[in-house]
Image: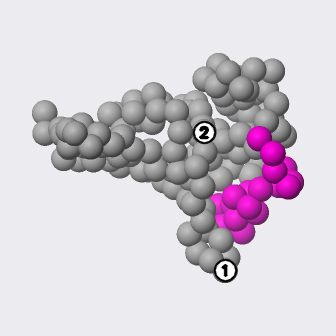
Amino acid sequence: MRITPDKARALLHAHDHGILSTVHVERGVDAVPVVYAVSDDLVGIPVDQVKPKASTVLQRERNLRADPRATLLIEHWDPADWSRLWWVRATLRWQAEGSDEEYRALGNLLEGKYEQYRDQPFARVLALRITGLTGWSGDSG
């Protein structure tokens, strides 16, 4: 059953990770697992200094520079009870230039949500505006 936009937004706020899909100019869809935080109609995805990486300019950011469209998919799976299955898809658009206040709010939310981000060890936070929400649930009630 389709879920309402309000329910989709509530699930997006409550969940702790998802799959971010951007568009690679040669390969097409480029999907990676991410953590995130939501503030109003913005999703913040950290470019952190916690996990090892070759560069702080990640492929997802290069993809967004070439094409600002993205999708964040979150889901819940219960192999024993399929009535508990659900997914939410947030259609996003990268905000190349956001306000300092927006970035600060997203950083504060990430710090509060994830212990690893205490003291905000970010190179930056990618801000993506929610342009659409859709979802489905196995629960008919």
Q: Position of residue 92 (x, y in %)?
A: 54, 52
Mark 1 crowdedness (10 Å alpha carbons): few <14, some 14-19, many ≥20: few
Query: At label 1, which amino acid type do we have?
Result: Glu
The answer to whether residue 107 of the structure is visible from this angle is yes
Mark 2 crowdedness (10 Å alpha carbons): few <14, some 14-19, many ≥20: some
Q: Residue at point 76% right, 48% down?
A: 97
Q: Position of residue 77 (x, y in %)?
A: 33, 43
Q: Looking at the rendering, which quadrant does residue 27 occupy? A: bottom right
Q: Residue at point 86% right, 54% down?
A: 55
**Side of 99 relative to 55 (left or right):** left
Magenta stretch?
51-70
Q: Residue at point 68% right, 49% down?
A: 95
Q: Position of residue 5 (x, y in %)?
A: 34, 40
Residue 35 position (above or below residue 62): above
Query: At label 2, which amino acid type do we have?
Result: Val
Q: Residue at point 82% right, 38% down?
A: 49
Residue carrying label 2: 35
**Side of 13 relative to 79 (left or right):** right
Q: Looking at the rendering, which quadrant does residue 115 occupy? A: top right
